Amino acid sequence: MAESSLVAGAPAPVLPRRRELLFGTGLVTAGVSMAIVTLVAQYLATRAAAGGTWFVDNDIPLTQPNMQLVTIGMSAVTMQWAVWAINRDDRYHSYMALGLTLLLGIAFVNQTTFLWHMAEVTMDQPEGPLFYAVTVGHFAMVIAGLIFIALMAFRALGGQFSSRQPDGISAAAIFWYACIGLYGLIWFAVYVQK
Amino acid sequence: MALTETRPETDRADTVVDEREPATQIERLIGSGDHLSNGRLLVGFSLIFLVVSAVGLGLAALDRTTDDGLLGGISDTLWPSSLIGLVLAGVLPLLIGLGICIVPLQVGSRAVSFPRAAALSLWAWLIGVLLFITSVAIDGGVGGSDDELARMGNLSLGLMMAALALGAACVATTVFSHRPVGMGLARVPLFSWSMLVAAPVWILSLGSATAHVFLGHISRADAAGLATTFDSGIAWLLHAPAVYMLAIPVLGIAGDVVAHLTGRRLAPYGAFQAAIAAYGVLSFGVWAQTPRSLQTIIWIAVVVLAALPVLAMVGGVADTVRRGTPKLAASLIALVLAHLLILGGVLAAALEAVDTIGSGQLWNLDTGSLAGAQALFLITAATLGALGGAIHWSPRLFGSVAAEGPARGGSLAVLLGGALAATVLLVQAIAAADGRDGLPEGLLFALVAAGAALFALGVLGGLASGLGAARQGHEDGPSDAVTEGLTLEWSTADDPVAVRSPYPLLDLRDGGASDEESK
């Protein structure tokens, strides 16, 4: 047997530093948000240059994006509910709120794929690359947000978060609110003003 | 183990034994989350890639000395690829590597925030750089003609940007959340403060540029399309005001080095922090990506006003030097000269700004050369500043004091080489005003090539100096020769040091100065 060492006598883990995950998530969220905002800006600039020919061959109804906005908007309430509950050590409500947020997020993902199918925008038309760059970029962000929330929900189930250390849930909330805010921007810039 | 779990009573210390094979050297290297190990690797690799990029720039310039391309017309690919390589494979990772090493020590922390993320940023960046170099070497990169290889170059640029943004986030989070009791943000050492200012600017700028990489990839653009995307969506990183962001940490390094070498407190400390913060704000250039945004009064004001915080730093540093009796160390010389190079970059941008006042073109300067001069001045300033920092913190970075001779020689060569290449482009911009011929192309690009070669030699000198210090440190063990530092990275005490001012170790020697005294 090679070199061995005793590990059972290791000291108990210390509490993570407060706000570390919160600040780190804030910075990463800022970078990702800047990428999406840049894509939207590029979309608007290209559409302005194209004039009246933008999406003349496609039918993108507003009903579907509106439903998406309502769905992801509702998840802002449930996410804040989770933050509120964990800050009061109310685990039962925290799990319920995180579960509902995940459910609404998955519904949003489903609605997005349905909208792509309905809009029938192809990559060969001039609008295609920018349309998909904006919506796929945001779609990927939402998927990342859902994974983040699911991970934090599992850690909450493992007892790692409480009113003394709620940072994981708060950090996931920051990222999720950015997803919601950016969808609001996309909803107005891409779908309302098409 | 989750925080709420408790150890079962049957879990006895003497019954559980780790039977795993000990990790090999390579496994320890790759799997390490140690901030010093990862930071050193980032610093070392970035110095190597700085040399590679500078050689590439030199070759591109040589190619341009004749109309039909002395080296077969490689400059169309090599010039933009080398310039962006100097930034993404050289200067930014060098500064972030220095931050990963030194910032945790400055704030009295044993580790960088998210050590695994910091390690991920190192290895992802390295993969990105290797892919980019491969792509450039076989007709891809930026401006190459092979579609697939150009796409690979485009993706590798995105990988480098994302990795660097992640590394910057780790460093900034360390400053924000790892500080000891008593060290409010107003008492953070200036290098750490400058990294805290720089990180959001870098993350936002790299995030925006990454969006263009993503757009280029999703649109399945060919090599020519990707070159256009680079010009319209990424090249702004090399133009004022965004290119100013490369030098934000240089101001912080200078503040810490001057205080250390003079043994004096910088005062008023808040003014130094404000100058760095102001410079950081003015270097935020995401909004200035399109040619239209460069014709605005806001752009003109921003690029010219950036000189003020740099001048404030120079004034403050000069005042501290006047009050103290500093050793004329290589790090001090490098950092003072780095400020002059920043001002050179601001001058080049200011000339472009003044030229656009009024109806558009005042002197009709050659804006392409002006943009090149801005980039080269700032890249050289950041390289020189980072080398100065690496030399200054060599006992902590490499385990031993870096030899002064190679350090001075390297710094001088970096300064002369970078300044030569940038100044020649600045002169060309003025000489070619109003559509005149300007300098002879052969002479112009021969001088730029000579400057790039000198720059590469200087970086090699810095690398040799660092490697020498690392070997010395490895043979002699960790150095405790330097104990006269002012900030926590120089602390050799096992017990925590009370922080009552930005200079806790000086307080300790002075018998406990108050915060008021430090002002």
Image: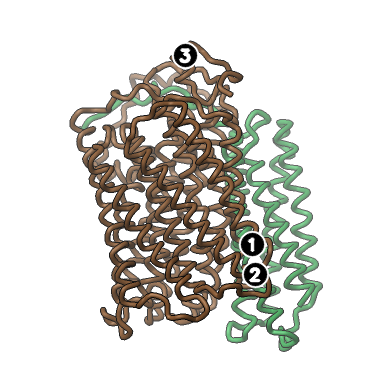
Q: Residue furthest left?
A: B475
| Residue B222 in sight in this render | no
Other-residue count near label 3 (Cα within 10 Å), few / some / many at <14 / 14–19 / ≥20: few
Cα–Cα span, label 1 and label 3: 47 Å
Q: Which mark is residue B510?
A: 3
- Above/below status of A42 relative to B268: below
Q: Tell me if B409 is positioned left or right of B34 in this view.
A: left
Cβ–Cβ below 8 Å for labels 1 and 2? yes
| Residue A33 in sight in this render | yes
What amino acid is at disc 2? Gln
Say which colour chain A has: green
Residue B473 image position (x, y, % from top left): 23, 32
Q: Nearer the viewer, residue A164 or B84?
A: B84
Same chain? Circles 3 and 2: yes
Cα–Cα span, label 3 and label 2: 54 Å
Q: Residue at x 59, y 28 (%)?
A: B184
Chain that appears brown: B
What amino acid is at disc 1? Trp
Subunit under mark 3:
B
Other-residue count near label 1 (Cα within 10 Å), few / some / many at <14 / 14–19 / ≥20: some
Q: Residue at x 31, y 62 (%)?
A: B452
Cβ–Cβ below 8 Å for labels 1 and 3? no
Q: Which mark is residue B299?
A: 1
Give the mark nearer the N terminus: 3 vs 2.
2
Residue A83 image position (x, y, % from top left): 71, 40
Q: Residue at x 37, y 81 (%)?
A: B146
Q: Quadrant of residue B18?
A: top left
